[in-house]
């Protein structure tokens, strides 16, 4: 028996998310006294693959097939299912991002496996196998018992610390025959955003709401984000008004993010917005209304005018960096 973890790559490179998954899988493997097998699909060089071993992967299965360059949920499900059965894995770890949400239900049906989705801690118990997850937009929690022989866990982003370890990793290159008729996805054009930190990858996010009063007032938010190496975001009313790009909208109906630091400026904190940022490790809120719901979720709060607070905050950051 082993733990199988699917490690997604972006243009042949792994991000923190993949290392977090392997660290988490290693934690479960220690509880079960077993090993971790990481699966990589796509063209990734050996030096990059070996980085997975730094976080506990005992074995890395690399599948480089030109037919699998683009994510095709049906084909990827077939590949991961085949590897799961070959390795005799009883626990599969996948990220709780868009890719994981596409793959986990399909794997569940194919392998007759129970799913613990959006899990944020190591299992609370092994018999019965019980996992912990946040519910009700982070306002509550649930203990989910998985009774199936094969168990699937999707890990909430930024919920588990990276744990580096020395490991003699074995890399196995596997060639699989893919049924071309099963491939339903074709990529015709790729347009990449450059010069900005992707919101879903950012460790720090500076976000603005209607309290900024006008799209012309976003200068201080962008300046603060630049100083902190952060991404910029906004609440839904701001994107609906066209003040900011829709791609910056965070919340239940926008992008769900989990940065280390989330700074909310002039955002009241509607429940839909809080649902999208509840995974943040630290939330700082700046608002003139001391009764704004955002302060209930915030770790630190400043009751004050953003147009007075932001310049002082920017000045403090500049002094610290100098």
Image: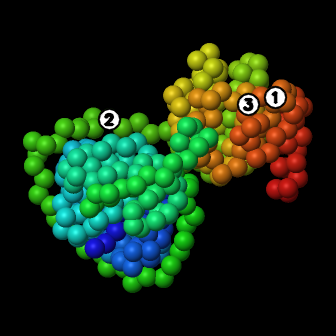
**Which one is in front in this view, the residue at disc 1 or the one at disc 2?**
1
Please determine whether, in this image, residue 80 is positioned above or below residue 227: below
Please determine whether, in this image, residue 39 is positioned above or below residue 309: below
In percent of width and height, residue 175 lies at 16, 64
Q: Quadrant of the N terminus?
A: bottom left
**Picture quadrant of residue 246:** top right
Task: Give the residue at mark 3.
Answer: 293
Q: Earlier in the sequence, mark 2 or mark 3?
A: 2
Q: Secondary structure at mark 3?
A: loop
- Mark pair 1, 2: CA separation: 47 Å
Q: Quadrant of the C terminus?
A: bottom right
Crowding at mark 1 (Cα within 10 Å: few <14, some 14-19, many 20+): few
Residues marked 1 and 2 touching at CB (< 8 Å): no
In percent of width and height, residue 90 lies at 29, 65
Q: Which mark is residue 291?
A: 1
**Which one is in front in this view, the residue at disc 2 or the one at disc 3?**
3
Q: Secondary structure at mark 1?
A: loop
Q: Earlier in the sequence, mark 1 or mark 2?
A: 2
- Mark pair 2, 3: CA separation: 42 Å
Determine the residue positioned at 64% across, 22% down.
238
Is residue 31 rendered to the left or right of residue 75?
Answer: right
Crowding at mark 2 (Cα within 10 Å: few <14, some 14-19, many 20+): few
Q: Is residue 207 in view?
A: yes
Task: Give the residue at mark 2.
Answer: 189
Is residue 296 rendered to the left or right of residue 108?
Answer: right
Determine the residue positioned at 82% across, 40% down.
301
Crowding at mark 3 (Cα within 10 Å: few <14, some 14-19, many 20+): some
């Amino acid at each position: 028996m082993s733990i199988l973890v699917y490690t997604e790559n972006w243009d042949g490179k792994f991000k923190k998310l993949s290392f977090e998954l392997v660290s988490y899988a290693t934690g479960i493997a220690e509880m079960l006294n077993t090993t971790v097998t990481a699966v990589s699909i796509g063209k990734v060089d050996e030096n990059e693959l070996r980085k997975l071993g730094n976080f506990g992967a005992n074995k890395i299965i690399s599948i480089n097939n030109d037919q699998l360059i683009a994510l095709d949920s049906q084909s990827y499900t077939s590949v991961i299912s085949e590897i799961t059965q070959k390795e005799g894995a009883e626990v599969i770890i996948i990220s709780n991002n868009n890719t994981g949400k596409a793959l986990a239900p399909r794997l569940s049906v194919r392998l007759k496996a129970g799913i613990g989705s959006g899990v944020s801690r190591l299992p609370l118990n092994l018999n019965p196998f019980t996992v912990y997850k946040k519910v009700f937009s982070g306002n509550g929690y649930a203990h989910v018992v998985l009774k199936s022989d094969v168990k699937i866990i999707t890990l909430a982003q930024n919920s588990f610390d990276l744990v580096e370890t020395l490991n003699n990793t074995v890399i196995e290159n596997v060639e699989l025959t893919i049924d071309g008729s099963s491939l339903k996805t074709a990529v015709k054009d790729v347009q990449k955003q450059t010069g900005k930190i992707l919101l879903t990858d950012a460790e720090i996010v500076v976000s603005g709401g209607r309290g900024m009063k006008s799209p012309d007032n976003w200068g201080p938010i962008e300046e603060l984000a630049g100083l902190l190496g952060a991404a910029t975001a906004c609440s839904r009313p701001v994107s609906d008004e066209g003040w900011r790009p829709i791609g910056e909208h965070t919340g239940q109906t926008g992008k769900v993010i989990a940065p280390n630091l989330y700074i909310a400026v002039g955002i009241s904190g509607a429940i839909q917005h809080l649902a999208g940022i509840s995974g943040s490790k630290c939330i700082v809120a700046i608002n003139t209304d001391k009764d704004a719901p955002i302060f209930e979720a915030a770790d630190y709060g400043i009751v004050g005018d953003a147009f007075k607070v932001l310049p002082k905050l920017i000045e403090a950051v500049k002094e610290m960096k100098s």
